[in-house]
């Protein structure tokens, strides 16, 4: 069949179609819907208005805002305060200076914080309780009044303010107990390297920062020789090595630290310090038992070995000036 024949066939079909087809469709019986769906329902009275819906959304948003605001102010960590003597303790506070967590970074610290009810208390209240326990357990007392205070906060101004306030509170509390504290205050930086080394050596981030800064002042110092020393021993070592702690520490208390020995002028070094003086200097740095003591007469150096538990320290002292030249440790 060609194209012409196809067109003629279609025309005949259209012409033969009944003309009343539309009328027949209209006359067909209609089925009534028994239930409207969401599209055909026309009753607007049962639909919540947009205004009412928005009021619900506003109330929900307000409660969410209040909840997250409460979480932010009371539950989220804001500052990390570190107190180090030999016990190392970390106090975590919220933006209201209330304590939300209390941690110990070593065994001595665990004994101090055990049983302390800190929830709902301010950082100042908890700090005073920690200080009292340190006094009770003889970590703080006459001749043992060194304390390292460190504060970390992302807001540097807030960190400085907290550090100043805590420094003042610690002085007031310990002076009321007839102690003369030597508080070493430092600012902390949030570095993963410090945290990694602190975790590796089992000490606080605060103490690790102090040790790192001591090594900056004297690169010959080794971390292994310092991590087991108390804050007081680290200060005595710094003093014996003539390190300028005021470059790394914010403290007016350093003036209270009595020198291990009066510094001798170079032209007056014909005489050497006595063996007893050398022993006293060594034991002021490492409190243990002297297992060996000798003098190198060629180099004019005292060599002192001190045993502390399973560790053995070797301390080399300049026999003319009493300056500590080297500290090493062996397991």
Image: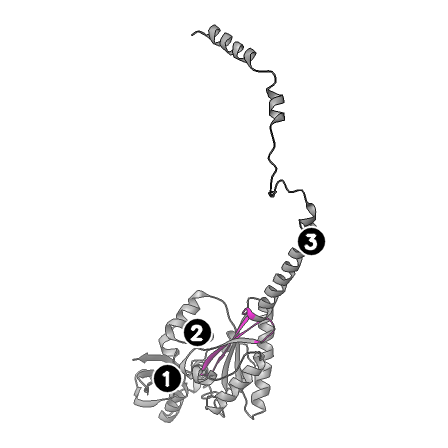
Residue 26 at what x, y percent from top left?
Answer: 63, 26
**Number of numbered labels in the structure image:** 3
The answer to which of marks 3 and 1 sits earlier in the sequence is 3
* Figure quadrant of the C terminus: bottom left
Q: Is residue 291 left or right of residue 198?
A: left
**182, above or below 2, in the image:** below
The answer to which of marks 3 and 2 sits earlier in the sequence is 3
Q: Which mark is residue 208?
A: 2
Is the residue marked by circle 3 packed among few (<14), some (14-19), or many (20+) residues within 10 Å? few
Disc 3 and disc 1: Cα gap in Å? 84 Å
- Name the quadrant containing residue 233: bottom left
Closer-to-camera residue (267/44): 44
Q: Which mark is residue 262?
A: none
Q: Look at the image and give the residue range highlighted in magenta.
A: 75-98
Q: Give the image's coloring scheme.
A: one colour
Going 49% across and 67% down the picture, which residue do you hit? 190
Q: Element at badge 2? A: helix
- Name the quadrant containing residue 175: bottom right
Residue 19 at what x, y percent from top left?
Answer: 60, 16
Is the residue marked by circle 1 packed among few (<14), some (14-19), or many (20+) residues within 10 Å? many
Closer-to-camera residue (210/70): 70
Q: Which mark is residue 317?
A: 1
Viewer-nearest of discs 3 and 2: 3
**Looking at the image, can residue 222 be seen?**
no
Q: Which mark is residue 52?
A: 3
Is the residue marked by circle 2 packed among few (<14), some (14-19), or many (20+) residues within 10 Å? many
Asked if marks 3 and 1 touch (Cβ < 8 Å), the reply is no
Residue 119 at what x, y percent from top left?
Answer: 55, 78
């Amino acid at each position: 069949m060609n194209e012409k024949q196809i067109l003629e066939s279609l025309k005949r079909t259209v012409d033969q179609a009944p003309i009343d087809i539309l009328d027949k469709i209209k006359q067909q019986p209609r089925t009534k819907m028994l239930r409207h769906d969401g599209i055909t329902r026309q009753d607007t009275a049962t639909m919540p208005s947009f205004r009412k819906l928005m009021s619900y959304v506003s109330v929900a948003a307000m409660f969410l805002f209040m909840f997250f605001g409460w979480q932010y102010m009371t539950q989220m960590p804001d500052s990390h305060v570190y107190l180090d003597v030999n016990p190392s303790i970390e106090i975590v506070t919220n933006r209201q200076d209330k304590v939300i967590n209390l941690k110990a970074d070593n065994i001595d610290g665990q004994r101090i914080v055990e049983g302390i009810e800190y929830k709902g208390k301010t950082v100042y209240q908890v700090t005073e309780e920690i200080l009292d326990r340190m006094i009770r357990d003889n970590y703080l007392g006459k001749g043992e009044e060194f304390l390292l205070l460190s504060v970390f906060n992302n807001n540097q101004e807030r960190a400085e303010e907290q550090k100043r306030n805590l420094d003042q509170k610690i002085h007031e509390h310990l002076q009321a107990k007839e102690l003369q504290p030597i508080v070493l205050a430092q600012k902390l930086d949030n570095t993963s390297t410090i945290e990694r080394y602190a975790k590796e050596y089992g000490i606080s981030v605060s103490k690790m920062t102090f040790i790192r800064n001591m090594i900056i002042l004297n690169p010959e110092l080794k971390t292994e020789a310092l991590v087991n020393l108390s804050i007081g021993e680290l200060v005595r070592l710094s003093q014996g090595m003539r390190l300028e702690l005021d470059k790394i520490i914010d403290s007016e208390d350093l003036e209270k630290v009595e020198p291990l020995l009066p510094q001798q002028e170079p032209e007056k070094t014909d005489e050497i310090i006595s063996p007893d003086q050398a022993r006293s200097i060594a034991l002021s740095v490492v409190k243990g038992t002297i297992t060996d003591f000798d003098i190198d007469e060629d180099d004019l150096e005292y060599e002192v070995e001190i045993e502390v538990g399973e560790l053995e320290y070797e301390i080399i002292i300049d026999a003319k000036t009493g300056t500590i030249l080297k500290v090493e440790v062996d397991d």
